[in-house]
Image (spheres, rainbow, N blue to C red):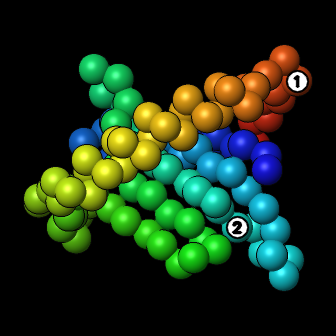
Amino acid sequence: MPLVAEEIGASAEGRRLVALAHTGVQNGDVMHDPETVFEFHALGAEPISFRNDYVGAHHEVYAYDEAGRRTGVYPKRRAGLVSFTRVWILNLRAQGFPGDDAQREVIA
């Protein structure tokens, strides 16, 4: 499956958000399997959400108010996503991502 990295905006605190996803197509729709959103800060990148369209899963690490500011954390989700992300990144590297044929495309 192709691997897509996309800058998707900024958090309410002004931190850069980047989504990393494997994508496929089902019935003409782009599907994410998985997609993890990372928030960048001074210490690095933190995974803050996970989704897998094929199984209807979507998990957020933090709770937010209407303005998009954090109001709480889900510790078990956070620990699980950090653990998953570590394994996923190792697997991506073993699969040769990003690889010599990686392409960068600026869309907007």
CA gap between label 2 and label 1 equals 23 Å
Where residue 63 sits: x, y (%)? 20, 64
Kindly identify which residue carries mark 1.
101
Query: What is the number of the mark on residue 31?
Result: 2
Residue located at (50% from left, 63% from top): 51
Q: Which of marks 1 and 2 precedes in the sequence?
A: 2
Query: SS at mark 2?
Result: strand
Where residue 11 sits: x, y (%)? 33, 47
Query: What is the number of the mark on residue 48?
Result: none
Q: In which quarter of the image is residue 89?
A: top right
Count neighbours of disc 2 (C-alpha within 10 A) and say few if under 14, some if 14 to 19, many if 20 or more: some
Query: In the displayed structure, would residue 83 be above or below residue 63?
Result: above
Residue 12 in view (yes/no): no
- Could you say which is closer to the camera, residue 77 or residue 94? 94
Report whether 35 appears left or right of 104: left
Count neighbours of disc 1 (C-alpha within 10 A) and say few if under 14, some if 14 to 19, many if 20 or more: few
Report whether 79 appears left or right of 28: left
Three-letter code for the amino acid on which mark 1 is drawn: Asp
Three-letter code for the amino acid on which mark 2 is drawn: Met
Residue located at (54% from left, 46% from top): 19
Residue located at (44% from left, 69% from top): 58
Residue located at (32% from left, 51% from top): 80
Residue 31 in view (yes/no): yes
Query: SS at mark 1?
Result: loop
Where residue 4 sits: x, y (%)? 70, 44
- Could you say which is closer to the camera, residue 20 or residue 92? 92
Query: In the displayed structure, would residue 33 be above or below residue 22?
Result: below
* CB-based contact (under 8 Å), mark 2 and mark 1: no
Instruction: Kindly give the residue lying farthest to the bottom in the view shown.
Output: 27
Report whether 32 appears left or right of 83: right
